[in-house]
Image: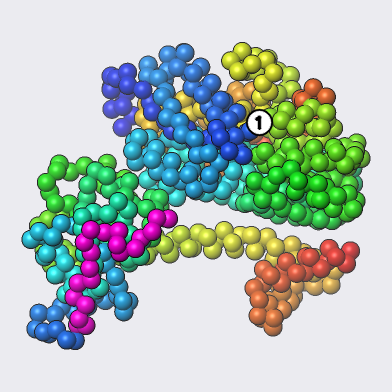
Amino acid sequence: MPDMSRADYGHDRWIGTQRPESRAGAEERPRQAGLPAEFTVAVIVERDDNGEFLIRELQRQRVAVRHIWPKPAQIPLQYDAIFCLLSDDLPQRIPWVPGEPSSALILVDDGKAPLNLKLVHNCAAHGMLHYPATARMIQSVLMMAREHFQYERRLRGRIDKLDENLRTMRLVERAKALLIRLKNLSEEEAYNFLRKQAMEKRVTIGAVAAAVIDSHELLS
Amino acid sequence: MGALNRNQRTSAPWRVGVLFSKTGFMSVIEETQLRGTLIAIDEINDRGGVNGRPIEPIVYDPGSEIRSYGQYAKRLMVEDGVSTIFGCYTSASRKAVLPVVERLDGLLWYPTLYEGFEFSPNVIYTGATPNQNSVQLCKALMSQFGNRFFFVGSDYVYPRESNRVMRELVRNNGGTVVGERYLRLEADRSEFVPLVREIKQAQPDVIFSTVVGESTTFLYQAYHDLGLNPKTVPIASLTTTEAEIRAMGYDVGEGHYTAASYFQGIETARNSSFVSHYQKRYGDDEPTNMCLEASYFQVNLFARTLEETNSLDTRQLRTFVMGAEFEAPQGSVSINPVWGHADVWTRIGRANRQGQFDIVFQSQASVKADPYLIGYGRCLENC
């Protein structure tokens, strides 16, 4: 992975480093529900009126905003969410492969080029913002992108877990069959035996099942 | 959409992606998969293409680097605008391509035997899974040589997972695993000598190998050099094909066993014409093998399906390929609609002095794919 140090970027800095409580409260909007304490957002757009508005609006969401421009060769990895101006070479600048994103990615369409849906597809992003944006659009696209990103991640985690469970279940089935045969237990008793052992030794039932199978092999 | 597709008049090529390593330690086998893919494409194009349009392969060489498979898959889909990809030998490379084809909705055609326990709506699997090779192999070895097994494999997903299945089979049927060793994928010659010494000491009845790539040669050569006898303690493998036997030397490979859906030695008219066609192009001494054959028949299945859909749309291709049949060099094969895996044949071969396999067991017909071993694998008597 290329070095992502701050020096790589022509211009980038944290904006609004003062804590929210030190700022005038009158125009504060409520912080987005469910945002973690330090939610970081990179904004990779030109700092024109639209860009300024986007940055200001995100600051009002009380997230830590960093503006990066001109666009870096590789999009940095360490942010929770990234707003990035859509350009033809964006897919090549995304460091992850589609399907394994490390941040929620929101495309920013400045409306200058004709809409290219294939390009949008290829970016595999979580949301899209069109200029001129309103405060409501910015708030909702950030929320939805974040939710989609996290939902995908939970689903991927669930699939990994399912795969693992499948393997464990095969082990448990075999250990159960061994116990039924060798210790003359009923199916229910065999299962309870495994579960009790797992609880007492504070390991997974799969680990107990594997131990039963292994030790049977050793002894036989 | 089908009717709409049929009205299009164009002779523009059907562009597809191809991802096999021509360089690096996996090139021994992947190069042959590349050839199998290209020879099928050429045959189809010589017949006039699919619905009057030729198939145009865009070929990248990931150089046996796992990460490159993911990166090239992205490049194929994003920059080259391709949605159908033929490629991958190792499970690790398949798993690198998987998130890309799943997110961008592409279709990977995977022509390699693997450990099973996977099902992606964006992959068509055309190699054998354990119920189509390990189960029969285990049965044959136990009846002929004995029940003490030593497992040796390359250190990555496939060997560990396929040994998990094999261990289950061996143990459930009264056998023992007397040793288990993994060497890194890039292992060199010197690492195999101590390994084979260790195997000798453990005195197994059978050495079960899932070593892949270049190091396959080193394992068999170390075995040969240390004077073990394949008549009493053979190496049995799921991955050693004619290509690896040629690389290690025919005398070194002689007498060892491999389970596969396809061997060059299958005596049918269909296979003879396939072999002679292949050798006319690549040379008389170039053997065919199971991975090459799967690469060849999956392109044909793809072309036949494309003829019906007249579209490279992943969903349409996938829908139409389910249940599709093809008269492959190994015999009649089809895509199992429950699993999106191919129903392929089970065969066991013993390598002879000519670098070919004599077939010592063959299934009656193609064996239904069961990648999660739901109906098989518990007991050898049932199969």
Verify whether residue A9 appears in magenta.
yes
Residue A49 vertical position relative to residue B236 in the rendered view, above or below: below
Span of residues in magenta: A1-20
Verify whether residue A80 appears in magenta.
no
Q: Is disc 1 surrounded by few (<14), some (14 to 19) or many (20+) residues within 10 Å? A: many
Q: Name the residue under label 1.
A: B290
Does dot 1 land on a helix, a strand or a loop?
helix
**Residue A9 visible in image:** yes
In the image, taking residue B7 as reference, residue B215 lies left or right, namely right
Query: Dominant secondary structure of the magenta stretch?
Result: loop
Q: What residue type is labelled 1?
A: Met
Q: Which residue is drawn at 85% across and 38% down?
A: B225
Task: Using the image as rendered, state which of residue A112 and residue A204 is in the foreground.
Answer: A112
**Residue B369 visible in image:** no
Task: Using the image as rendered, state which of residue A162 and residue B378 is in the foreground.
Answer: A162
Q: Residue at x 21, y 77 (%)?
A: A17
